[in-house]
Image: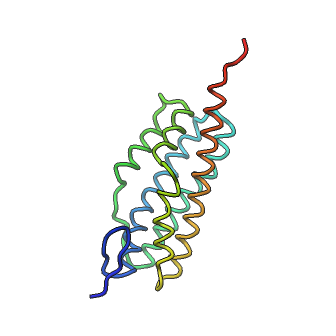
Amino acid sequence: MATFTAFGRDYPSEREAILGLMNGVQVAEACAGTAIGNWIKTCKIPELRGGLKIIAEREAFHGRVFQQRVHDLGGECTTELDPFSAEGERILNDDTLSDLQKLTDLVKRGGDPEVLLKPVLDFAESLVEDVESKEALKLYYADEMSSATWLRAMCRKLNDEASVPRAA
């Protein structure tokens, strides 16, 4: 029986590996789009809010695209939100935290985006049979890297501004 190895485990086929990844990612992305969208409603920092609007749309879009791809491949979206993502969304919806606290937590929890996302790109590059999923995953990687890079830069900027003493 042929197998396809991805993310440190063996799958019966390339298709099954794709379904495994996209099923998990679609729920996390859709929920992140909602959580960030909710944060936008209360965000008091205009420049942060402007970027979050783009990121929320990207997250929701990724969720829809991957959900549709799972269905196109004959799969069902059955994965529940993982605990790491659920905790992140709880923090984004916590009205007792400031925008800077939420942003800082989001960036810290995400860690180095290259370390987090490179396995997705490597997986996409390893796909041979399903070039549609391959290209969707490569663009997903690019979108996520763009969002993570912007979030990290905004976090540095806002934290730097917050640490500068204000003249009386």
Q: Nearer the viewer, residue 145 or 28?
A: 145
* Placement of 132 over or under 80, stated as above or below: below
- Residue 11 found in image quarter: bottom left
Apparent side of residue 122 relative to residue 151 in the rendered image (left or right)? left
Q: Nearer the viewer, residue 71 or 62?
A: 62
- Residue 72 found in image quarter: bottom left
The residue lying furthest to the top in this view is: 168
Q: Nearer the viewer, residue 113 or 102?
A: 113
* Placement of 165 over or under 33, stated as above or below: above
Across and down, in percent, residue 21 comes to 40, 68
Q: Quadrant for the C terminus, please.
A: top right
Q: Nearer the viewer, residue 126 or 74?
A: 126
Residue at 43% across, 74% down: 71
Q: Quadrant for the N terminus, please.
A: bottom left
The residue lying furthest to the left in this view is: 1
* Placement of 12 over or under 117, stated as above or below: below
The residue lying furthest to the right in this view is: 167
Apparent side of residue 16 relative to residue 109 in the rendered image (left or right)? left
Residue at 39% across, 80% down: 14
Residue at 31% across, 82% down: 3
Across and down, in percent, residue 123 comes to 46, 72
